[in-house]
Amino acid sequence: MKNNRALGLLTVTHGVNDMYQGAVPALLPFLVAERGYSYALVTGIIVAATGLSSVVQPLFGVVVDRRPMGWLVAVGMMAAGLGVGLAGLVDDYAWTWLAIALSGLGVAAYHPAAAKAARVVGGGSARSMGVFSVGGNVGVALAPLFVALVLNAAGTRGTWLLAVPAVVAGAGYLLARRSPRTSGSVQVGPVSASVGAAGRDDWRAFGWLSALAVFWSVPYVVMGSFAALNVIGRFHVSTATGAATLTAFTAGGVAGTLVGGWLAERRGRLSTIRLGYLTAALAVAGVVFVPGLAGVLCCTLLFGTALFVPFAAQVTLAQDYLPNRVGTASGLTLGLTLSVGGLLSPAFGALADAWGVHTVLATLIAVLAVAVLLTTRLPEPSGLVPASRPVVEPAA
């Protein structure tokens, strides 16, 4: 019961934290409309939010591996919220860039510590990691609505209101760490002691998994960028219908994360990962070749679901490949490798300008075919010893 409560608390913090990842792109149209930012300046803000965060996140993972830092869950989340909250208070571009960079650093600090904590309270279960991961999916999905509601009412200078959920959730998490009802579950120490001691780190297997995560990142970023534009341009529908297509993709991600965790517990992680990528490849082929709007919407929903089926299994597998460096594994899997899709997005944008969005989506069939081949290189982790009981860090 304790662990369920702690996992639920971590899932809520994941939703709040990742809401600020989704808040940055949702904030950009307001900044462009009010301040007239060019596309180059907008790109700079995106780099501040994602590029810097993705590079620094593995470093936080290394630090988390060396000493217990459960408090970093709250501090990272509050920094993510405060950065977004400060972004609109001053018109100066440098101020806005630095504020968004602070938010990105907060997001980077949160993930390794929180993923490590979720692994402990969930006993290393892929299903528990799926529950934790879906919190982030929900947060990203809710971000545009949250930003629109606040800024339409308060204007760009009202960005400080966007920081309120992070401050409240961060304070609540810190109080829970000190509560005798939940502290034993939330304050986690060495992961190997709680989910099973392990042998050597398998860097070769982790390298294959990191490569696979890169091939996950590209379809995720490309579909997120072009799903709406595809149906608008192809079927000449309204922007609302385009937004519905994007919603189908993100909603599928929520469902796929939960389904993937459940499947991994029953069918095994490697089988679940392979099934997810194979289904995603077929679904994106449907997005490209199915002629009707309804069929494309259904295929987009299926694609979002299938793409996220491997997510929780990949995170726990990475942690098992590097059992002595769980924070590092989490930081690399959730951070640096997933940033590649964002770094490649300008190339896909140029391809779309030259050949059309439909062609860009067609390239994802080949990307996912390579991902399916990479899944055959993943071995089962070896040397795991059954877990005994959780070890907790001091309440300092």
Image (spheres, rainbow, N blue to C red):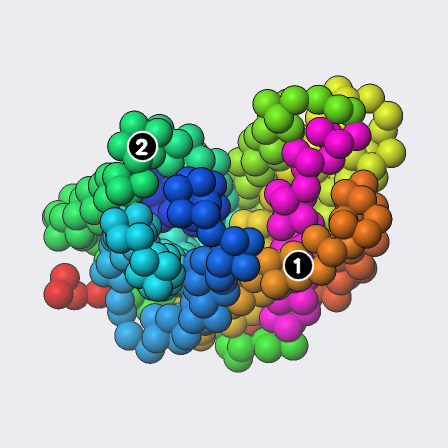
Which amino acid, by three-letter code, is at mark 2? Answer: Val
Residue 319 vs residue 333, the one in the foreground: 333
Residue 78 coordinates in the image, percent (x, y): 25, 53
Q: Is residue 371 magenta?
A: no
Residue 9 vs residue 391, the one in the foreground: 9
Q: Secondary structure at mark 1?
A: helix
Q: Residues within 10 Å of mark 1 (few under 14, many from 20)?
A: few
Query: Which of the two labelled residues, at mark 1 and mark 2, occupies the earlier sequence position?
Result: 2
Q: Residue farthest to the front?
A: 36
Seen in the image, is 292 located left or right of residue 45? right
Residue 68 coordinates in the image, percent (x, y): 27, 69
Question: Marks 1 and 2, how far apart in space?
Answer: 30 Å
The tag on residue 150 is 2
The tag on residue 346 is 1
Q: Are marks 1 and 2 in contact (CB under 8 Å)?
A: no
**Magenta-tinted stretch:** 206-234
Q: Note whether 52 is above or below 222 in the view shown.
A: below
Which amino acid, by three-letter code, is at mark 1? Answer: Pro
